[in-house]
Amino acid sequence: MSKLLMKKRMFSIVIILLFPSFLFVSLLNYYVQRDAIKDELINSSLPLVRDYIYDHISDNLEGPILTSRLMARDTFLVNWAIAGELDISEIQNYLRTIKTDHDLSSTFFVSAMTNQYYSYEGVHKTISEGDPHDTWYYDFVNSGNAIAFDVDSDEVLNGTLTIFINVRVVDDQGTFLGVTGVGIEMTDISSLLAETQVVYGRDIFMIDSAGLIQAHSDFSKIEKTSIYDMEGLQNIAATLLSSIEGTISDEYVVQRGTVIFTAKYLENIDWFIVVQQDLENSLRLARKNLLISILIGVTVSIIITLLSMAILKTYQKEVTKLTITDHLTGAFNRLYIESILLQEIGRGKRYKYPLAIFMIDLDQFKEINDSFGHDVGDTILKQFVTLFKDHLRQTDIFARWGGDEFIAVLPHTNRQEARLLANRCLKLVRAANYSNNIALRISIGATTILETDTPQSLVNRADEALYYVKKHGKNSYHFLSISE
């Protein structure tokens, strides 16, 4: 056998051995990568985006949901409806204030008695069962639910697509008075989905419990497309919609290949967030630039972590503010001042420094409400709080005790200093200008801490002092010691 023939045979054998081996290793490596990418999509990338959207939307909806629930229990709204809806400007101003204070797109109240749809602009319309745009109201009423979400065009905002949070309003006896709530422009959530979709290259949308798309970067699909009509996804739609205990990750096959998806249930709005990715696209990108993808993934993880921390920190600040402040006046609320009073009494006894408290009542405030209306009364309360707070020390704590009664906790303040401060406050309130040229006057009951005092005994003594002032002509102060 010639050397040339031997070389050819050896070359052929090596090729025959190496090529299949190389092909096998390449295919094995491809499928290993394919499984790794698939696993990474199911367990990391898609859930990361899903949870980011979930946290962001939950944070954005938490405030409006709380506001809607508070509106439904607001004594003003309930009493106004029970009284016969006499002054439309009152409900208009109320809804406008809620809208402005909470930066909402819309606020509304639909009366069960008159079928009037009130918005922050006044009476918008009279609803009827024959109007297709009003079916949401009758569906919600008939459902018996206390709260529900509805995506619809807002007629008050010239047809802007809006998420409405609807809450049932009832009186103390459970009598149905109507439906109130707020609206959030759909563009806010759709923009978030579109931006995230561009950044992460995922297909993201939200569906209701029936499988109908409620949020999507493509507005034409909202409330028109169901997952039961989507290729591949229709086969596992029932499984997806039954996963209300938490999250689900799976895959389905379409003509172009395999699609990996993950979904998470938002209990407070009864919707699902769905994040999905075409597996073939992921493999193609991975084959071209695997290293860059890994670096981008690490960077994105850091960014999302930082964003999540920042969002959580902001949310915690807002929740803390809501729990310690009075919604109307911005002063601290009674729950907060009771805890502060306990702390200050403890410090005063421990470090032997004086502590005074004022119990303050606005004289004839009921007459102000009766003569000028509750809106003016609310304005007077706000003006009084602003005035009073501005002339207290940074160490003093001022809170709304209830109705038109307020309390001031004054650390490092003895009896003589408390008397001087009370006189100064009386003069300050008398000299100030208020809405409608109202001449506001106040009564102050004052006392200082004793060694045996508890928060209750200290407050009771200040109350007794206030009662003395109210009984003897008002527009003054009285200091009550234990000997009195």
Image (spheres, rainbow, N blue to C red):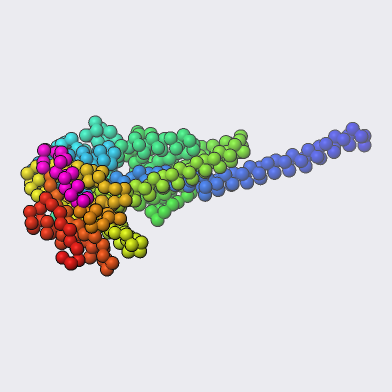
**Residue 42: x %, y % from top left:** 51, 48
User: Horizontally, is 13 left or right of 215 in the view?
Assistant: right
Residue at image point 17% right, 61% down: 480
**Residue 14: x %, y % from top left:** 80, 40
**Residue 296: x %, y % from top left:** 55, 38
User: Horizontally, is 72 left or right of 308 in the view?
Assistant: left
Q: State whether the magenta stretch is mostly helix, strand or loop.
A: helix
Which of these two is toward me, 38 or 352? Answer: 352
Q: Is residue 234 shown to the viewer in this render?
A: no
Residue at image point 37% right, 36% down: 190
Residue stretch rendered in magenta on the structure = 420-439
**Residue 27: x %, y % from top left:** 66, 42
Quadrant placement of the C terminus: bottom left
Which of these two is toward me, 215 or 233? Answer: 215
Q: Is residue 154 shown to the viewer in this render?
A: yes
Residue sitting at the far front = 416
Check if residue 412 falls in the magenta segment. Answer: no
User: Horizontally, is 391 left or right of 28 in the view?
Assistant: left
Quadrant placement of the N terminus: top right
